[in-house]
């Protein structure tokens, strides 16, 4: 059985003369929770943006369910069955929560969009009381909740998240990870870039370690948690080092 | 003073329509299009050309020098101005967008402005034209206030257009998508918003507003190739005063600039009129750079 998402020898970056990714290979199966970790400048976020069509791929191939989506227009990502939550600016702060969700569902027929938005409020009840407030008034955790709620509106088969724990309090980070784990258990593939290596590996199925735009190590998250190299570089004594 | 306020409100409506188009383009497409004022001139001349080619009369409806003929001419002028705006985007701005810095785009718009203005000059000549040569009798209101019926009509129509535009941006799916692109184009794309569609509608609305504004202006002044250029500074002052991307702000900005201009004329010679919006612009940029109604670096409200 082929993977849901597959990257083969992906080379790319913000300019063709200066590639950041130097031949990345990666696979995510349906319903699988995959984490990408690595030091700063490893190309983790760039890899995710390349999948989303926000960064140009000059060589290599990205497929979703066997279909070539290399350099696919970002606008068509939702219809292809993918959702992406960027690390920063992942909600529309000048719009209300309701408007954020409406915009997230705007490719759907009106009735279906209304149903999905109602389901989003059921899944994230904390958002209900703010529905008519500007999204800028939300806390960090609530913003992340809204970003994930928006990403799920089109019922994607794959959700990509770029450092969803950034700037969140530790207890909220745990809530976000648990929420993503549940999502994967419900059959949605999750691909997450994360600095909190230990926390991310604890909830995910598999982990890729990138360094200098290349694959370094990969395996099940359990194996990676016990891998001496990963332990030494990313987990350290404090259990959390910049990954 | 009351007469100056009445005159200011009438001119303010025309400035406001132009400023709403400018602020929409600045907020969503993130560049300052100095050719926008020439779209007003183009709209005014296109309506004139339609009247001339079809032999229609501007029409007379009750006290207004604005009848079915001019309504039809305005509709066609809107279509032709939108076509011009889209053609210029295709031929000039599209080729530069994302490849050059903001200032290069602004200079390109200066070049486009000159080309449009002198093309109009070449085609229609430099002489003044009018939609109608009919005389209009002013309404006498209260104790000495004179209001031309066309001025009152222009004021009411401008308010109506502003309300419709505000409701469109606030409540329609397309308006929501336009506001989304204005704040964060990349996130809007992630949500499946097609930039080309938003680009089309931004120019369509901006160009349409410019055409309507141009025809309204042509009803109250002589139609000349430099009529838009005369409104350039007041329009940009109004857009900045209202806050970039803020359509309601641009409406109020238009009225504020025109009222200040009209009231200032009570004390200063008419030759200095053009300096008034410049002073307003300087004061706004100095005291309140984001405008009175808090615009954004990119954004449409």
Image (cartoon, coloured by chain):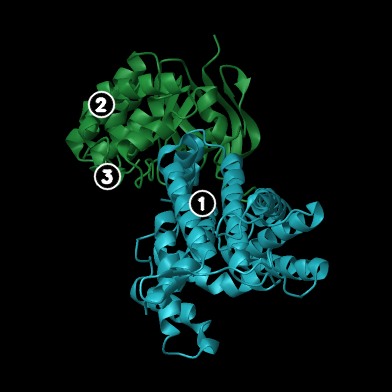
**B172 w.r.t. B218: above or below:** above
Which chain is the one coloured green?
A
Give the quarter of the figure containing the C terminus of chain A: top left
Is residue B88 visible in this depiction of the protein? yes
Q: Position of residue B25 (x, y in %)?
A: 54, 55
Looking at the rendered structure, the secondary structure element under dot 3 is loop
Pick whichever, A220 or B215, lies toward us: B215
Mark 3 or 2: in front is 2
| Disc nearest the viewer among 1 and 2 | 1
**Shade representing chain B:** cyan
User: Residue B234: horizontal and vertical position, in percent?
Assistant: 51, 72
Seen as rendered, the residue at the extreme top is A1
Number of the label disc, if any, that sits on residue A167: 3
Q: Is residue B7 left or right of residue B210?
A: left
Residue at screen point 44% across, 40% down: B176
Q: In the rendered structure, the residue with mark 3 lies on which chain?
A: A
- In the rendered image, which residue does mark 1 sit on? B28
Which quarter of the rendered picture does the N terminus of chain A lie within?
Answer: top right
Q: Which mark is residue A124?
A: 2
> In 3D space, how far apart are the residues under numbered discs 1 and 2 (Cα atoms)?
31 Å
Q: Quarter of the image holding residue A239?
A: top left
Q: CA distance from mark 3 to mark 2?
A: 20 Å
Mark before the other along the chain sequence, 3 or 2? 2
Label 3: few (<14), some or many (≥20) within 10 Å? few
Contact between marks 3 and 1 (CB within 8 A): the answer is: no
């Amino acid at each position: 059985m082929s993977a849901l998402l597959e990257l083969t020898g992906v080379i790319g970056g913000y300019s063709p003369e200066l590639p950041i990714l130097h031949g990345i290979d990666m696979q995510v199966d349906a319903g699988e929770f995959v984490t990408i970790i690595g030091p700063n400048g490893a190309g983790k976020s760039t890899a995710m943006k390349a999948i989303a069509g926000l960064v140009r791929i000059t060589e290599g191939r990205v497929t979703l369910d066997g279909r070539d989506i290399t350099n696919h227009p970002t606008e068509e990502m939702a219809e292809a069955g993918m959702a992406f939550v960027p690390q920063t600016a992942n909600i529309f702060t000048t719009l209300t929560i309701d408007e954020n969700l409406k915009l997230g569902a705007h490719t759907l027929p009106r009735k279906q969009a209304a149903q999905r938005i109602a389901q989003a409020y059921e899944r994230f009840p904390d958002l209900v009381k703010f529905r008519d407030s500007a999204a800028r008034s939300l806390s960090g955790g609530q913003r992340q909740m809204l970003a994930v709620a928006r990403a799920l509106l089109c019922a994607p088969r794959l959700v990509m998240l770029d450092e969803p724990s950034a700037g969140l309090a530790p207890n909220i980070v745990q809530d976000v990870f648990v929420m993503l784990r549940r999502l994967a258990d419900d059959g949605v593939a999750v691909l997450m870039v994360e600095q909190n290596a230990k926390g991310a590996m604890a909830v995910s199925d598999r982990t890729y370690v990138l360094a200098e735009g290349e694959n370094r190590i990969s395996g099940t998250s359990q194996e990676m948690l016990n891998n001496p190299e990963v332990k030494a570089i990313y987990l350290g004594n404090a259990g959390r080092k910049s990954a | 003073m009351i007469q100056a306020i009445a005159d200011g409100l009438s001119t303010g409506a025309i400035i406001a329509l132009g400023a709403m188009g400018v602020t929409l383009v600045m907020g969503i497409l993130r560049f300052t299009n100095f050719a926008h004022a020439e779209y007003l001139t183009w709209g005014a001349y296109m309506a004139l050309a339609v009247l001339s080619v079809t032999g229609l009369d501007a029409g007379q409806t009750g006290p207004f020098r604005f009848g079915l003929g001019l309504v039809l001419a305005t509709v066609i002028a809107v279509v032709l101005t939108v076509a011009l705006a889209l053609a210029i985007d295709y031929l000039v701005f599209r080729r530069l967008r994302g490849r050059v810095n903001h200032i290069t785009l602004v200079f390109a718009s200066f070049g486009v402005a000159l080309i449009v203005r002198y093309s109009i000059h070449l085609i229609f000549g430099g002489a003044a034209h009018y939609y109608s040569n009919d005389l209009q009798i002013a309404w006498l209101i209260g104790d000495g206030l004179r209001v031309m019926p066309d001025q009152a009509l222009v004021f009411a129509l401008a308010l109506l257009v502003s309300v419709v535009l505000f409701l469109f941006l606030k409540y329609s799916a397309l308006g929501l998508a336009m506001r989304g692109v204005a704040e964060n184009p990349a996130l809007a794309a992630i949500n499946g918003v097609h930039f080309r569609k938003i680009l089309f509608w931004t120019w369509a609305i901006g160009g349409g507003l410019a055409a309507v504004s141009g025809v309204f202006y042509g009803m109250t002044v002589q139609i000349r190739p430099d009529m838009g250029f005369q409104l350039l500074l007041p329009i940009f002052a109004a857009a900045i005063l209202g806050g970039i991307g803020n359509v309601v702000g641009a409406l109020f900005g238009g009225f504020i600039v025109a009222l200040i201009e009209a009231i200032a004329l009570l004390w200063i010679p008419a030759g200095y009129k053009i300096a008034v919006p410049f002073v307003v612009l300087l004061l706004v940029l100095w005291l309140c750079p984001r405008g009175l109604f808090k615009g954004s670096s990119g954004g449409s409200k």
